[in-house]
Image (cartoon, helix red, strand yellow):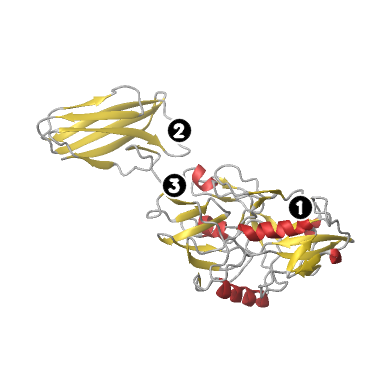
Amino acid sequence: MKTILKSCIIFWSYVLLFATCQNDMDFTNANINDDAITNSKDIIIADGFIKSPKWLAHIVDSIGQHYQPTPETGRLLYPFVFAVEYKNQEYLCVCDPFSSACNNHYYTLLGNFVDPHSSDWFDLDEAKERTLLWSPPWSSRDAHVSTRAWVGTVNITTPNNSSVSDTWNRTEELTSTDITTMLNDLKNQYPNATIVTGSSPTTTYNCHAYAWHITAPQYGSAVWMGKTTNPTNAYWLDDSYIATTSSSGNKVAYMSDNHSAVVVTGDNFISKWGPYPLMSHHKNYSPYNASQVNYYKRFNPPAYYIGGVSYEDYSGSSTVYANNGLASIRLYAYKAYNSTTPTSYTWSATWTGQCNSWYQYPGGNYADHNIYINSGQSGGTLRVECKIYYGGTLLYTAFYYLSVY
């Protein structure tokens, strides 16, 4: 799900773990009071680039500079600029074709940001009522770049049943000509990335939806996740997923950008590039900034369990080596997300084997528990039991097995 502008426009209220707005320009108020124009025909283009008004050139440059240059050509992925006539007034539309958050950004001729989705613009047929003013000099694309038709919000949840905000049904806006042109663009600009077999450009879903909702374990339907925000942190804030390493993770969040991916192996991913198709690519070979990516894996522990110092350790057993008959281990009683928070714990242990000297500490009302082995002999199994209470009610009895060598 995603690329964003390198600048902080109104669309990104990205607060918790995602740091996506990196430019000092606030696109909600782009007017810098220079080169005022009263008609889109007053835009000055020289040497293939927009020279005036400066606020428009700055927006276009900021979007282009956000993306990683195409590896083979070193070109930046600039947006398109359209004139849009709506209710006898002219606006400028800056269209970011790789964006997985918001493609189209509207401004008055003075550079003031306009949010069409917060007003009465829903009846605007952008594809019919707009005129292409400028496109990147290198691009083979014409005015095919998609517009968005937001049908309505959709209620989806994480595996742990937390609501995922800002998720929408979006109609298909691409024609067959659009699709052919976009596929040719990808082959020219990213020849070492592979279009996933059976995939095609589409505006019905984006990268976030593909990574977190459409693929396992959700297997959800096509949606567009994140019209004005990036809501994917819902998937790890409720422990549906936990952070892990590249060797064990199967979901990826581009923390340095607005993008999500699915791991194939290691740093080889599949992700959807805005309205473009699913792409198979290396972590560093895409339009998106991969300077910080986080790997996640599904976290599905029992309601209560005993584990080691690692929160994700709910295997129920481990091995300790009692060199010279000495060993120690600390265990913890954990609860899964949405489970009742315990108020007390009772620990005990049963030993089977040769070791004849061990003790537990503390023996009281604690979530953590230490076991020490101090004997001239070792070998056997220690079954640790923890009764977990809420008030006087027993919530769960958890077991953990230590194999001692």
Q: Kindly indicate whether the residue at mark 2 contacts the one at mark 1 (C-beta within 8 angstroms).
A: no
The relative height of residue 212 versus residue 192 in the rendered view (above or below) is above
Q: Position of residue 163 (x, y in %)?
A: 57, 46
Looking at the rendered structure, the kind of residue marked 3 is Ala
Q: Which residue is mark 2?
A: 340
Asked if residue 45 is positioned above or below residue 155 in the image, the reply reads below
Q: Earlier in the sequence, mark 3 or mark 2?
A: 3
The amino acid on which the numbered mark 2 sits, given as a three-letter code, is Thr
Sooner in the amino-acid sequence: mark 1 or mark 2:
1
Mark 1 neighbour density, 10 Å: few (under 14) some (14–19) many (20 or more): some
The answer to whether marks 1 and 3 mark residues whose Cβ atoms lie closer than 8 Å is: no
Q: Are marks 3 and 2 in contact (CB under 8 Å)?
A: no
SS for tag 3? strand
- Viewer-side label of 3, 2: 3
Q: Is residue 250 left or right of residue 123?
A: left
Q: What residue do we see at 47% from left, 47% from top? A: 240
Report x, y in % for residue 176.
66, 77
Q: Secondary structure at mark 2?
A: loop
The quadrant the N terminus occupies is: bottom right
Distance in Å between CA atoms under marks 1 and 3: 35 Å
In this image, 318 relative to 89: left or right? Answer: left
Tag 3 residue: 243
